[in-house]
Amino acid sequence: MVKTQMLLAAAGEHNPIIPEPAEIVVGLIAFLLLLFVLWKYAIPRFEKIYAERSERIEGGIAKAEAAQAEAQRTLEQYKSQLAEARAEAARIRDDARAEGQQILEEMRAQAQTESERIINQGQTQLAHQRAQIVTELRSELGRHAVDLASRVVGESLEDEARRRGTVDRFLDELEAASAPASSESAKA
């Protein structure tokens, strides 16, 4: 087989591996023509498409950066508003606490005033009742003393002036006798 190929090559037949010079020229012209068409029409179109795509990508990146910057601004604004709201809530809470304390103080003062009024009223009433009871007791004690003295003396002490004088003197002596005893018990 190798021998046949050599014989064919020697006989002047065309070798399919090596192209003919006319084919090389036609191929070169066709290649240059194809290169010219590609250079003139296809490559500018590819460049234009590439540039548009790059612009779109860069525009998308710019939009994304702008959106991110806007989101960051919004986040900062939200944080600022949240801090303001917290400060406002703390201020309202403090105001409410202060107002509650003030109301509590007012109610205490009111209760103290009312308590003092009730105590004073009770003391006045008690003093009035005491005076009334002392008056009643004096008159009753006076009657009993006059009755007793009448029985002891044997004469009638019906005279009002005499009876009053006797009763007052007796009560004064009784108070004088009880005053030192009460001051000694207070000391002890």
Image: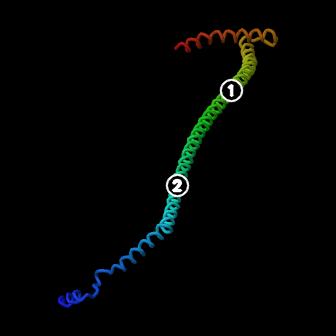
Instruction: Residue 64: give its label.
Output: 2
Query: How far from the left and from the top, in percent, is residue 61?
Result: 51, 55
Identify the residue at image location x=66%, y=12%. 175
Identify the residue at image location x=72%, y=13%. 149
Q: CA distance from mark 1 to mark 2?
A: 72 Å
Identify the residue at image location x=66%, y=27%. 109
Q: Earlier in the sequence, mark 1 or mark 2?
A: 2
Q: Is residue 129 above or below residue 150?
A: below
Badge 1: residue crowd in 10 Å (few <14, some 14–19, many ≥20): few
Query: How far from the left and from the top, in percent, is residue 138?
Result: 73, 17
The amino acid type found where label 1 is placed reads Thr
Between 51 and 93, the one lying in front of the other is 51
Q: Is residue 86 above or below residue 164?
A: below
Q: Which residue is mark 1?
A: 113
Q: Quadrant of residue 132?
A: top right
The amino acid type found where label 2 is placed reads Ala
**Horizontal arrangement in the rendering, residue 161 relative to residue 105 (left or right):** right
